[in-house]
Image (cartoon, helix red, strand yellow):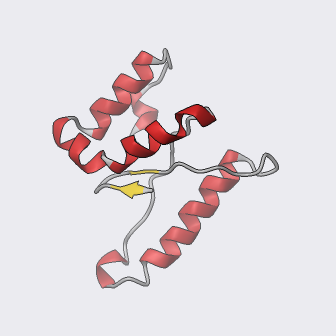
Amino acid sequence: MEGNSNHIHLLNTFPRVISVSKMIETIKKDSSKWIKTQGDKYNNFHWQNGYGVFSVSQSQVSSISKYIAKQRDHHQKMSFQQEYREFLKNHNVDYNEKYVWG
């Protein structure tokens, strides 16, 4: 996992008996509880409503791990929003701006 000021990237595996939405719900709930124990400046922390999930093949895990590790440097050159739009376009994913950044 690597975090930035406005998003995080996670690379993980999970059993097929757990839905993606349940996994995200658990991550958001548990991390929100934890961060609020880290000081008063985090009292108002909250996650946005949405999330993006992408599957990768086992053969790509190493390159994705390296990509995630370099996020701070990467986002000095391109914003998360620019990168995300480019990713969606490159993979022919239709989206509506109204629902992406909520």
Q: Which is nearer the eye, 69 or 22?
A: 69
Looking at this rendering, what residue extends furthest in the right direction?
A: 17
Query: Which residue occupies 43% across, 64% down?
Result: 46
Rendering coords of residue 57 (x, y %) = 61, 32
> Is residue 49 found left or right of 71 in the rendered image?
right
Rendering coords of residue 101 (x, y %) = 39, 40
Query: Which residue occupies 57% across, 67% down?
Result: 29
The quarter in which the N terminus is drawn is bottom left
Residue 77 sits in which quadrant?
top left
Q: Which is nearer the eye, 8 or 81?
A: 8
Query: Which residue occupies 30% across, 46% down?
Result: 70
Looking at this rendering, what residue extends furthest in the left direction?
A: 77
Q: Which is nearer the eye, 71 or 49?
A: 71
Vertical placement of 27 versus 59: above or below? below
The quarter in which the C terminus is drawn is top left
Rendering coords of residue 64 (x, y %) = 46, 39
The answer to whether one can see residue 56 in this image is: no
Vertical placement of 20 versus 54: above or below? below
> Is residue 72 found left or right of 95 in the rendered image?
left
The answer to whether one can see residue 64 in this image is: yes
Vertical placement of 31 versus 16: above or below? below
> Is residue 46 found left or right of 70 in the rendered image?
right
> Is residue 49 found left or right of 72 in the rendered image?
right
Rendering coords of residue 28 (x, y %) = 54, 62
Query: Which residue occupies 51% across, 39% down?
Result: 52
